[in-house]
């Protein structure tokens, strides 16, 4: 089930990226809405409405799938644990102790 959700999530992600790139940018007039011929299928306001609705639907599916994948992962204990924090051990980090050394003496004595 986890693998199926990941594949669907990837497909929705790529579709969402594609539909966002097709949206009309207010600065350069790009996107689907640039074709203004009267006989076109997607022209003017209908293109903006369709792209906006599709973006909203894909975004909702993306969020729902993200939550569902998180729930499935938490319940199944994928990869041996339900949480990455369960895998972490409180280890004492040992830092090497540096010996106190005298500063190196200059090769040329300082003038006084």
Image: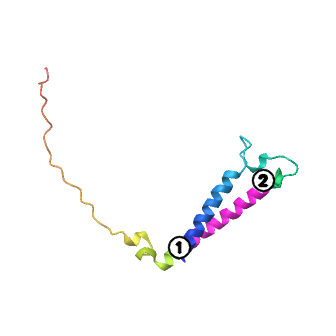
Q: Which of marks 2 and 1 is nearer the N terminus?
A: 1
The label number, if any, that marks residue 48 in the structure image: 2
Residue 57 shown in magenta? yes
Please give left or right for residue 61 compared with residue 80 in the image: right
Residue placed most toward the observer, 111 or 11: 11
Does residue 112 sit above or below 61 in this rendering?
above
CA neighbours of label 2 inside 10 A, class few (<14), some (14 to 19), many (20+): some
Q: Quadrant of residue 54?
A: bottom right
Mark 2 and 1 residues: CB-CB less than 8 Å, in contact?
A: no
Which residue lies most toward the bottom here? Answer: 76
- Quadrant containing the N terminus in the rendered view: bottom right
Does residue 34 sit above or below 89 in this rendering?
above
- Quadrant containing the C terminus in the rendered view: top left
CA neighbours of label 1 inside 10 A, class few (<14), some (14 to 19), many (20+): few
Q: Where in the figure is residue 12, as x and y percent of width and height?
A: 63, 64
Task: Label 2, secondary structure: give it.
Answer: helix
From the image, tell me which residue sits under label 1: 3
Q: Where in the figure is residue 100, as x and y percent of width and height?
A: 15, 46
Indicate the colouring scheme: rainbow
Give the main secondary structure of the magenta stretch. Answer: helix
For the magenta stretch, what is the residue range?
A: 49-71
Q: Which residue is drawn at 67% across and 65% down?
A: 60
The label number, if any, that marks residue 59 in the structure image: none
């Amino acid at each position: 089930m986890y693998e199926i959700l990941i594949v669907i999530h990837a497909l929705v992600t790529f579709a969402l990226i594609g539909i966002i790139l097709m949206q009309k940018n207010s600065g350069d007039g790009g996107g689907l809405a640039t074709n203004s011929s009267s006989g076109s299928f997607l022209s003017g306001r209908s293109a903006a409405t369709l792209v906006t609705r599709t973006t909203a639907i894909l975004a909702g599916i993306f969020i729902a799938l993200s939550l569902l994948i998180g729930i499935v992962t938490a319940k199944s204990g994928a990869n041996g644990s339900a949480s990455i924090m369960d895998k972490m051990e409180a280890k004492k980090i040992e830092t090497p102790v540096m010996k106190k050394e005298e500063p190196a003496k200059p090769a040329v004595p300082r003038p006084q």
